[in-house]
Image: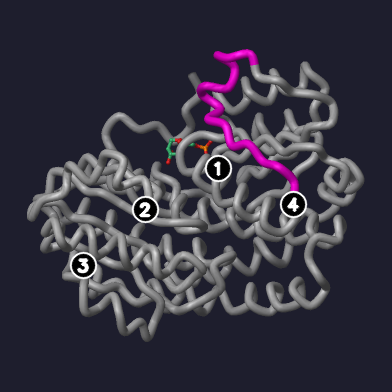
């Protein structure tokens, strides 16, 4: 697992199909808006991309469920770029969203894993994630590879549009190189996370909270748990908790809070206090060396620190491991979860 994770990050950052991006460089630079279409885990990678592109390239982004896109009458123009993200490259809803956007004259950029797949062929240009085939049905390594590619894309767009400085770009490039080692360290948390899984394997519900770049990670953590362990789980932006989900918190509710040190850290700390006051069982994912949250949470998972822009690449790993161990302890087949198809082609 470690080798393939290291390998895929190197591949994604080293052999990105830059030709695909370069050919459409001016379109990207002048884009009025970017619409991202995807399903499931790929949609969560799209949400991370929304933060990245708006932050680094200052282009407005909309992230759409491909499965819903065509059922309204979306406004799409020739000046829009549509980014379609898919691990399998065969997801029928994503293909249908691409066809609709194409018919309105938008430029379609694909982020796919499988060379020659239907989605890759339907797009005008694209970047392959080269993450190798997913062994199981549920996407895991596809997510980190997609986010890596989308990070590079946002950095390139930011550079071309002059919305990030050369110094900032260089800093991010240097930091990106440290990510494989940080992911390796996160994977080494395996034994600790298995112990946490033992504690929660009989839970019937889970809540996941995150803010900023960690909000899509919360959604992805909840989806992984649902997909492979069949436990009901929901992810929310941490601040949304007060607007409803707070009613669910009691001494039986496990709450996974992704609380790494970033610009919203203090706010997340106060969310944890609110959960604690209602006796929720807190499993916190924090940056290494955090002194505040370990005094409040029942379980603490320390991940290597990295800047918030790159944090999803690291913070998702313990959540994937948690879902994996809970599923295995419940006797679920993690590679072939019930009712799930590798490619959703209808
Ligand atoms: C999308 C997706 C996956 C999920 C499962 C079903 O697939 O929802 O995220 O884990 O495999 O399909 P894709 O378009 O990324 O191949």
The CA span between labels 4 and 3 is 41 Å
Q: Is residue 280 left or right of residue 316?
A: left
- Quarter holding the N terminus is bottom left
Q: Secondary structure at mark 3?
A: helix
Residue tagged 3: 194
Q: Residues within 10 Å of mark 4 (few under 14, many from 20)?
A: some
Q: Secondary structure at mark 4?
A: loop
Residue 245's place in the image compared with 194, above or below, is: above
Q: Residues within 10 Å of mark 2 (few under 14, many from 20)?
A: many
Residue tagged 1: 87
Pointer 2 with pointer 3, Cβ within 8 A = no
Q: Looking at the image, tell me whether mark 4 or mark 2 is earlier in sequence order.
A: 4
Q: Is residue 34 left or right of residue 252?
A: right
Residue mark closest to the camera, 2 vs 3: 2
Residue drawn at point x = 75 percent, y = 37 percent:
33
Pointer 3 with pointer 1, Cβ within 8 A = no
Q: Residues within 10 Å of mark 1 (few under 14, many from 20)?
A: many
- Which residues fall within the magenta stretch? 59-73
Residue tagged 4: 58
Residue 97's place in the image compared with 60, above or below, is: above
Q: Position of residue 313 (x, y in %)?
A: 51, 63
Identify the disc placed on residue 327: none
Residue drawn at point x = 83 percent, y = 73 percent:
166
Residue 114's place in the image compared with 151, above or below, is: above
Residue drawn at point x = 45 percent, y = 74 percent:
261
Q: How is the image coloured?
A: one colour
Q: Decide whether residue 160 is among the magenta residues.
A: no
Residue tagged 2: 238
Q: Looking at the image, tell me whether mark 3 or mark 1 is earlier in sequence order.
A: 1
Q: Looking at the image, tell me whether mark 1 or mark 2 is earlier in sequence order.
A: 1
């Amino acid at each position: 697992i470690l080798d393939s994770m290291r390998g895929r990050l190197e591949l994604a950052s080293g052999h990105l199909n830059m030709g695909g991006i370069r050919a459409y460089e001016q379109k990207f630079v002048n884009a009025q808006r970017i619409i991202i279409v995807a399903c499931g885990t790929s949609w969560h990678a799209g949400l991370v991309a929304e933060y990245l592109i708006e932050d680094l390239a200052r282009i407005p982004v909309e992230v759409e469920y491909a499965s819903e896109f065509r059922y309204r009458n979306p406004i799409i123009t020739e000046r829009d770029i549509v980014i379609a993200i898919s691990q399998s490259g065969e997801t029928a809803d994503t293909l249908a969203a691409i066809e609709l956007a194409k018919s309105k004259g938008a430029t379609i950029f694909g982020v796919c894993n499988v060379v020659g797949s239907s989605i890759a062929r339907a797009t005008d240009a694209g970047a392959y994630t080269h993450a190798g085939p997913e062994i199981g049905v549920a996407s895991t390594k596809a997510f980190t590879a997609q986010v890596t590619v989308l990070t590079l894309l946002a950095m390139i767009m930011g550079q071309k549009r002059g919305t990030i400085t050369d110094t900032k770009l260089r800093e991010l490039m240097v930091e990106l190189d440290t990510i494989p080692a940080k992911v390796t360290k996160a994977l080494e948390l395996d034994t600790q996370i298995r112990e946490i899984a033992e504690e929660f394997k009989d839970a019937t519900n889970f809540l996941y909270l995150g803010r900023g770049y960690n909000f899509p990670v919360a959604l992805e953590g909840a989806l992984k748990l649902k997909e492979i362990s069949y436990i009901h789980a929901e992810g929310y932006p941490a601040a949304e908790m007060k607007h409803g989900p707070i009613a669910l918190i009691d001494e039986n509710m496990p709450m996974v809070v992704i609380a790494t040190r970033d610009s919203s850290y203090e706010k997340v700390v106060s969310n944890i206090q609110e959960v604690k006051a209602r006796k929720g069982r807190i499993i916190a994912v924090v940056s290494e060396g955090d002194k505040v949250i370990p005094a409040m949470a029942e379980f603490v998972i320390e991940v290597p620190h990295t800047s918030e822009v790159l944090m999803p690449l690291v913070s998702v790993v313990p959540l994937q491991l948690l879902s994996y161990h809970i599923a295995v302890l419940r006797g679920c087949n993690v590679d072939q979860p019930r009712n799930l198809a590798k490619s959703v082609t209808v």
